[in-house]
Image (tube, rainbow, N blue to C red):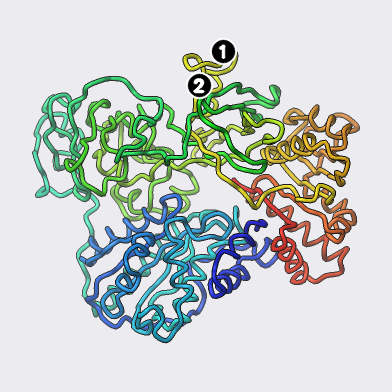
Amino acid sequence: VRSSDVVFIQEWSLPTRRAIYSAWTTASFSGPKSHHRSLTTTSSPEISPLSRKDQPVRILYASQGGTAMLFSQELEEALGDELGKECTILSWKEAGENSPQEVLTPGEALHVFLTSVSGVGEPPDNGREFFQWIMEQEPVGGGGVSWNEVEYTVFGLGNSKAHPNHYNVIGKALDAKLKALGAQRVLELGLGDDGDCIEDDFDKFLENLLQLLRDAEEGESPPEAELEPADEQTVVQSHSQDAKKDDSSSPRVSCPPGVSSREDGTRLASTKRPTIKLLTPVTDIVRENLFHLQGTPNQFYPSSVKEWEVNSNQSLAPQGGDTALHEMKIRIVPGQKLEYETGDHLKIYPRNSQVIVDAYLERLEVNRHSIVADEDQTADNYPHPKGLTINETLTHCVDLGATPSPSFARFLLGRKDIDYRTDIALARRTVIDLLGEQGPEKKIALEDLLYELPPMKPRYYSIASSSLMRPDEIVLVFRPCKYVSSRGILREGVCTSYMLHQAAAAVGSVVDNTTTSSIPAVVNSNPGFRLPEDPSSPILMIAGGCGIAPIRAFIEERSAMRSSNLGPCKLFLGFRSPEDEAYQPLIQKALATGALTDAKITYSYGCREPHQVCMLVSEMIRIQGKEVWDHFENGGYTYMCGGARTFGAAVEAEMIDVLQQHGDMSWDEAQTYLRSLAQSGRLLEDLAD
């Protein structure tokens, strides 16, 4: 929870604020009562039977990053394939723009709501208006809807590890409000946890919904869904040797000249997705970004996204190895104005590595420079910009490193008996991994790949510079993400690998339009994460690893204030090892000038010198418990910055212990105390994984 929680809540009406506050009480700080894995569904809710077995299904989703939209599409597909159900899909934005009374049709459809959580406990951007409309309704005649005839179920998307304090608050609030209005809940609230395995959670919710509808059909069993394309759906059947190597029963489609990579001029087609019309290649150039689409119907980046020049990019700890902290300095291209505030984030739009793109292209039967036809030649629900080449689409628009959904994984492997959570999700296996299991000749239809994989999402990075000290430049701190999966495969983060590639092009180069690298990005305002308005207020900053980024910004900001009224500012900062340490000169200078009054640096391992302290930052909180308690009681502001799943949870747990020991509180009282600090804007966090 951040102080922006309070800012957001004040924007809503009283009924809306009450609903979200109520949901917050079930998504509290990490502690002994909340360390278990969240269940997919709630326990023992009031469930009503379906009134009609033949009614259609109306799927209404609110999605910030695209996952809820993808789940909605999977739900529509499964209901159609398994039960032959008539389904419609609407975003909450569409529902709000239309009359909500017309979208909610009592007695005429089963309403399935899917919603994620945005920011710090807010509905997604495309669902705010519709969410508020529901929250403001009254049970009797509210909104002109006969609520007691509305049948519904809700699936929420959240992350209990990264955002434990507002985990699934929108889904919970919506479910509770609909029930309070008198609507008929026909299936338990589903809670998807991206901190564990959200795909598995949705898969279970989907199966429960399918079983509910099967039971309503009075035991009539629909035919099993086909896992492989059927012969009769073949568009053009090739009997060449190449076709037999793949699957001679797979449907094929004829291609214009130069599109197919096969001698017979055909390619695999999908049995479930509309055929993508491809045009003959006209160039072999692959664009570095997609700014040429700005202002067109196929615009990819939001209008606020700008092109940023990379001034420098270097390791902050040369002895720290492949995953040492790195610093990137960027500036907006000439002719554009830079506006940001200290504490904001930068949202970066990455691209896939060409090596990964090439691996996927090997599994397709198309020329990489074939063009996706524009206008009405390609289906309106095509999820990516039209007019791009296949290479450009795979490079910029599709998250090739994403784990396939349960249904897509079953399709790729050709079987249903998979332990999705263990064998796919936790092992972080990708589509290319599963195709590899089928042999080097295994191909996939372009439509199945582009419709099934999620779109590329922007990544958020805390800005590590002060707008007072660096009004024309932004500093970023990042750690390259590299790890070996449980199956022994080296994985690399999409965005950090992209940023490292920029380093190779930018270090040592002259910054101009022809020699420097550039990245597409936009400043994301974070008004709930700011230094206190009163510079004399006591500050305690607690950070670990990449959490140094916003701390660096705050130290620069206090150094630039040059105020004689600066209050005390203490820092608890942790690194992996002394070799991983960064910004020691900056911290020492801040101590000398008064921007910092105390700094305690710890390391997880590798201490060799007597002055080096090996312990976790959370342990330092315990050792300095009396000092931390006094800081809380004296009106101090506390900032937590670092990883959410381990660092953030451990720090909050130690704070609970400090309050119990030095504040003589029970666990519940300590939790309430922390929540009150957050709601008053004195406990702020910038936590992410």
- Find numbered disc 1 in the image and state the secondary structure of the residue it sits on: loop
Question: Mark 2 belongs to which amino acid?
Answer: Ser
Identify which residue is drawn at 44% across, 72% down.
134
Q: Which residue is mark 1?
A: 510
Asked if marks 2 and 1 touch (Cβ < 8 Å), the reply is no
Residue farthest bottom in this picture? 140
Image height of 480 relative to 58, above or below: above
Q: Residues within 10 Å of mark 2 (few under 14, many from 20)?
A: many
543 or 134, which lies in front? 134
Identify which residue is drawn at 83% across, 70% down.
665
Name which quarter of the figure residue 611 lies in.
top right
Image height of 171 relative to 442, above or below: below
Q: Residues within 10 Å of mark 1 (few under 14, many from 20)?
A: few
433 or 335, which lies in front? 335
Q: Disc 2 or 1, which lies upstream in sequence?
A: 1
Q: Which residue is mark 2?
A: 517
Image height of 288 relative to 680, above or below: above
Question: Mark 1 belongs to which amino acid?
Answer: Val
- Residue 385: x and y, percent? 31, 39
Relative side of 607 to 207, left or right = right
Relative side of 156 to 112, left or right = right
Q: Say which mark, if any, is on residue 383.
A: none
